[in-house]
Amino acid sequence: MSLKTLWHRLGSPRWLYQMSASWVWVLGSLAAGLLLVGCVWGLAFAPADYQQGNSFRIIYIHVPTAIVAQSTYMLLGSAGLVLLVWRMKVADMVLATAVPFGMSMTALALFTGAVWGKPTWGTWWVWDARTTSMLVMLFLYFGLYALRQAIPREETAGRACAVLALLGTLNIPIIKYSVDWWLTLHQPATFKLTEAPSMPAEMWLPLAVNVVGIYCLLGAVVLAGLRLEILRRERDTQWVRGLVAAR
Amino acid sequence: MSFETFGDFMAMGDHGLYVWLSYGVSLVVIGANVLALRRRRRQFFRESRALERRRAANAE
């Protein structure tokens, strides 16, 4: 299939619904398996940190949730752009359905960060660049959620959310570089594209497993939500009525 | 294994509370995401069947 046909077919909710059925299960099973392996590995088998002791094991849940929270936001920003430029229905559905997942992952990253901060920094919270920019992202997610609820006309709500999602992507590089640009208690990134991790492999491998696992979870949750959104918006079409009758 | 006994594993040095609190809350939040999807999907089909029954009743 050429890229152009794929692009056109992605615009067809019915095609997407039929194609994606098995993907939810594949991605969901991968996510469950990888996250189980990564967590058990990180909690029981990875060596303790020579400075932080065992509280460092929070990294195996803190970093994946923080990474996927930002990726989900980038997904929303991209969906917003596609919606504004091409008016693609599916983009609006992604924009509607990925918000709760991203919001809960941002909240988790902030929560596990606070719980990790207490034994490591001696405080639950500091107003520094990394934590504050993550908090800003949480409020952007709240905004996207509230905006969708507040505007009854679906088309208007979609376009308003698209604009907010796009504007909010400006915050992503600030989160990413906050630990390099400003003085902070937060440790620098574990994984960088340009250099090898500064941790030994038995410490970062379980983290890598969990990062891949949580991306599979993102895929499974967003696809499942998208499929539901397709059904809801196409409720009156023949093919959805047929599906309902067949159950 | 990084721990000698199961008790050591649960204690996590003296950081057990922090570690298990983080993982416990994460499990609940991830589980809630998955369960909410399942609940909404079932709700959709329940409501749609009810809608179809009303349509059929009206058509008679």
Image (spheres, rainbow, N blue to C red):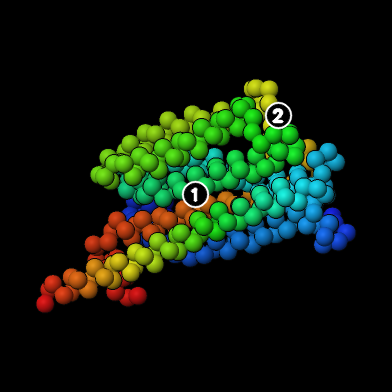
Q: Position of residue A27 (x, y in %)?
A: 54, 59
* Vertical placement of residue A192 versus B3, above or below: above
Q: Which mark is residue A185?
A: 2
Q: Quadrant of residue A187?
A: top right
Q: Chain of mark 1?
A: A
> Which residue corresponds to mark 1?
A101
Where disc 2 sits, the SS reads loop
Q: Examine the image and state in which quarter residue A200 appears.
A: top right
Residue extending farthest to the right is: B4
Res. A37 image quadrant: bottom right
- Front residue of A196 and A235: A235
Q: Nearer the viewer, residue A71 or B7?
A: B7
Pointer 1 with pointer 2, Cβ within 8 A: no
**Amino acid of disc 1:** Phe
> Label 2 sits on what residue type?
Leu
In percent of the image, x 49 and y 44: which residue is there?
A103
- Of residue A214 and residue A21, the one placed in the foreground of this image is A214
| Residue ID at (35%, 75%) | A247
- Number of numbered labels in the structure image: 2
What is the C-alpha distance between the residues marked 1 and 2?
28 Å
**Residue A244 placed where, x, y %?**
31, 70
Q: Residues within 10 Å of mark 2 (few under 14, many from 20)?
A: some
Quadrant where the N terminus of chain A is found in the figure: bottom left
Q: Which mark is residue A75?
A: none
Residue found 54% across the figure and 34% down from its top? A135
Secondary structure, mark 1, is helix
> Which badge, 1 or 2, is on the more N-terminal residue?
1
Is residue A19 something that shows in the picture? no
